[in-house]
Image: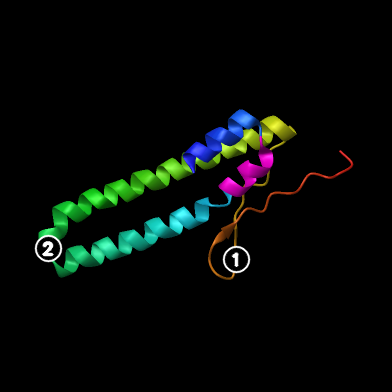
Amino acid sequence: MLRRSLDAYGAEDAASARRIWGEDGAVDGYQRTLYRELLLSMMENPSTLTRATHLLWITHNLERVADRATNICEQVIFKVEGHWPDFRQAESPQGAAEAPFPQPDADQ
């Protein structure tokens, strides 16, 4: 995700930036799932505490990398189109985030 956001920045590709930005919700979901699973593991088997704590920090930091990638995507869209997209996320029925960016008018 980070590599692709940097590629979109270099290519000034707003369409790719929108797609990449929309993936953040999935990364957030993966992080929440792993967090729950690791906490359960620590409660069931205290000998996993140290290892699971390290894994919690790893998942947290990877989720933050994805957040930074979305920030790059937002900058790409602004750079290319000259306006900030609507950053609010709408939840789909399946729970995956969708990017509600307004599409540029063909007349512009």
Rendered view: 16 above or below 97: above
Whole-percent x and y of residue 2?
A: 48, 39
Tell me the element at label 1.
loop
Q: Which residue is mark 1?
A: 92
Whole-percent x and y of residue 18?
A: 63, 46
Q: CA distance from mark 2 to mark 1?
A: 37 Å
Give the side of residue 86 with respect to residue 95, left or right. Answer: right
Residue sitting at x 42%, y 41%? 65
Q: Main secondary structure of the magenta part?
A: helix
Residue type at numbered disc 1: Ser
Q: Which residue is mark 2?
A: 46
Q: Quadrant of residue 31?
A: bottom left
**Within 10 angstroms of label 2, few (less than 14), some, or many (20 or more) residues?**
few
Residue sitting at x 14%, y 59%? 48
Rendered view: 22 above or below 39: above
**Within 10 angstroms of label 1, few (less than 14), some, or many (20 or more) residues?**
few
Which image quarter holds the C terminus? top right
Tell me the element at label 2.
helix
Rendered view: 38 above or below 16: below
Residue sitting at x 66%, y 36%? 13
Whole-percent x and y of residue 1?
A: 49, 44
Instruction: Identify which residue, 26 or 13, lies in the foreground.
Output: 13
**Figure colour scheme:** rainbow
Task: Find the residue positioned furthest to the right.
Answer: 107
Q: Earlier in the sequence, mark 2 or mark 1?
A: 2
Query: Magenta region: which residues?
Result: 13-20
* Residue 65 painted magenta: no
Whole-percent x and y of residue 52?
A: 21, 55
